[in-house]
Amino acid sequence: MPPVLRVLILLIAYAQAGYGLLLAVLRRVLSPRPVRSAPIEPAVTLVIAAYNEQSVIAAKVANALALDYPRDRLQVVVASDGSSDETARLAREAGADLVLELPRGGKIRAQDAAVRAATGEIVAFGDANALWERDALRELVTAFADPEVGYACGRVTFVNESGTNQEGVYWRYEMWLRGMESGLDSITAGNGAIYATRREAYVEVDPVMGHDLMFPFSLVKNGWRAVDVPTARASEKMVPSIEGEFARKRRMMGHGWPIVLRGGLLDPRGYPPRYLLFIASHRVLRYATPFLHVAALALTIARWREHKLLLAAQLGLLAGAAAGGRVRARPLLLARYYVATTASLGISLLDYLRHGTEAGWDTPEGTR
């Protein structure tokens, strides 16, 4: 096997499975960095950025007000990003402390405006369709008892698994990886369903760059830790179909590629050594996976007589993905999910290079 092809295959295998094995080894041989969490009750502002969320906003505000947290220590802010429906009115009627009716500027600018209006020393964020468990906020803020922590992210469970989407399988593995990273240093990405920052650590970023990817590494570079809080839990409806998940990830990485290419993720300055390994493995190499696959397939086809089994394996994966569109067998659905979500990374880069990324966002199919 040509050395280049061997390296490509090893990189793909490492990005998908080898990195997890490495983290498991590192947790055994390196000193952990436990979070010095403790029960605390800081003043918290819970921000809900919303664009045309009239179908869920009242339930979200009610969920926030029902959290097991002192009411006089909690401010609920709904930032309506140019909504053309009844989002703002319904949020007020549901009891939100502050409703900002903003011109359409995108989720990030809506969150920035809410933070500027916040009274809490901790600013928490949740998607409009993400429902938090009653103790989620109390659990989330325990991480901020550690003065090194600037960002804390909870766990989201995806519901509505009756469709073809296999995101739940991937997400459970992803959450395990983040837990391992957090125990050693800091996480490399968060999620929009449930997270929080110290108000002093909050940074305003380019409106096309989402917090999920931008915040953890940015705050680490600023001297903070970004940690996982597995006991802070929320649930959110999952896109029901693999095709819908492809579209969702394509849109998400349209906001991710600007972070990778010009947002500082590739700049190693400011990363602690362990964290640099995490970024290179979990982010850079993961995002390079579609291009590694294409290069490996091209080299295999060029020398197919020598690598018939390898070519058969690659074509078998593609055939399984195609069959997964007609047959709801778990192995075929997993193959379809893997090919679709991997392809979404590459296609989203082409989208970004062709026409850039808009700051606005729309709700994914079937999640409301």
Image (spheres, rainbow, N blue to C red):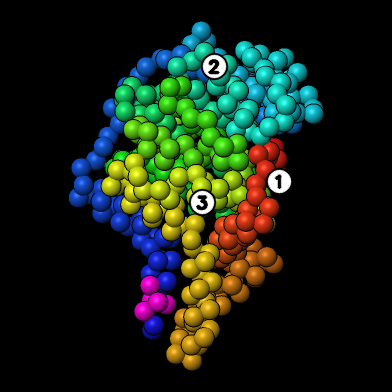
Q: Nearer the viewer, residue 169 or 261?
A: 261
Q: Residue at x 51, y 70 (%)?
A: 293
Q: Which residue is mark 1?
A: 365
For residue 153, above or below residue 164: above
Task: Name the quarter where the C terminus is drawn.
Answer: top right
Q: Residue beneath label 3, please? A: 261
The percent coordinates of residue 80 (x first, y second) are: 69, 25
State which region is magenta: 3-7
What amino acid type is highlighted by mark number 1? Answer: Glu
When asked about the image quadrant of residue 217, the answer is top left
Q: Using the rendered image of the protein, determine whether residue 98 is visible from the camera's viewpoint.
A: yes
Image coordinates of residue 73 in percent, x first then y, are: 48, 11
Q: Is the residue 185 above or below the residue 325 in the image? A: above
The answer to whether residue 79 is left or right of residue 6 is: right
Residue at disc 3, secondary structure: helix
Give me the disc on residue 265. Answer: none
Main secondary structure found in the magenta portion:
helix
Q: Reply above or below: 360 against 295.
A: above
Considering every residue shown, the one lying at the far bottom of the view is: 305
Q: Position of residue 135 (x, y in %)?
A: 47, 23
